[in-house]
Amino acid sequence: MKHGKHYQDSAKLFDSTKLFDTAEALELCTKTAKAKFDETVEVHVRLGVDSRHADQQVRGAVVLPNGTGKKVRVLVFCKGENVEAAKAAGADYVGAEDMMQKIQSENWMDFDVVIASPDMMGIVGRLGKILGPRGLMPNPKAGTVTPDVARAVTEAKAGKIEYRLDKTNIIHCPIGKVSFGAQKLQENFDTLMGAIVKAKPAAAKGQYVRSCVVATTMGPGIKINPGRFVPAGSANAQ
């Protein structure tokens, strides 16, 4: 694969075969960002599990202490008292059948997070083929199907992100913008990785975190030593 000049210049700043500690890797991320926009810093974690098995799924959500740096547009499916509660919490769009019809008839997708009260899942379920492939389907494990929609909206606006395995057993998540600086990025990184390590399935065997890479939107991947991410209770835990 042919990379541009900025990418190649960034790649020369470090040894691509080396495993770095987190602080050094994130500091390098801020130095390798060459784009004219504020690049997102992403984490890519390969786990020693098999996502084809239900008992080895890794999925959840966590609120990053410093947010993601992105303005999040929230759509809430609810009725009754929850409507005003969701609006007061900062929801951008609130509705029920009307929102379902808007999505179906207009292919309207001007939102980043979908939250639903449990009684709305009969309506939201009809949007499964539209929201599912985009990773927007509300889910109890992610806290996006909840009777407390106001709290869910507040968390989404504060920087709550969902982590889940893809088909290749890798989790991809943003942890902020380059402009955050290494310290805030590390706080977000530690929060995310703490949640992923804690979510280790009982059925998972062997080394849990196989590899961990951080990279900016346009920059090269920087490898972090996976040996430091050992679940509590593991034989290798310190």
Image (cartoon, rainbow, N blue to C red):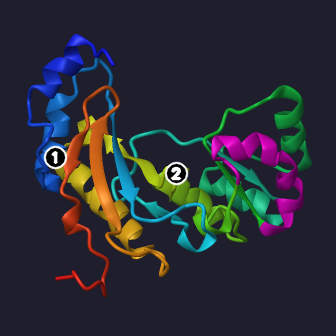
| Above or below, 171 relative to 236 | above
Q: Is residue 97 above or below residue 40?
A: below
Who's the residue at 13% across and 55% down the image? 21
Amino acid identity at mark 2: Lys
Measuring 32% from the left and 25% from the top, which residue is drawn there? 218
Whether residue 79 appears in this view of the structure is no
Q: Does 198 sit left or right of 214 as displayed? A: right
The span shown in magenta is 118-137
| Closer to us: 84 or 100 | 100
The part of the image, by quadrant, that contains residue 210 is bottom left
| Between discs 2 and 1, the one toward the N terminus | 1
Label count reads 2
Q: Residue most toward the top?
A: 5
Q: Position of residue 14 (x, y in %)?
A: 9, 35
Residue tagged 2? 157
Q: Residue at horizontal 27%, vertical 13%?
A: 4
Dot 2 alpha-carbon crowd within 10 angstroms: few under 14, some 14 to 19, many 20 or more: many
The residue identified by callout 1 is 25
Of residues 58 and 100, the one drawn nearer to the viewer in this rendering: 58
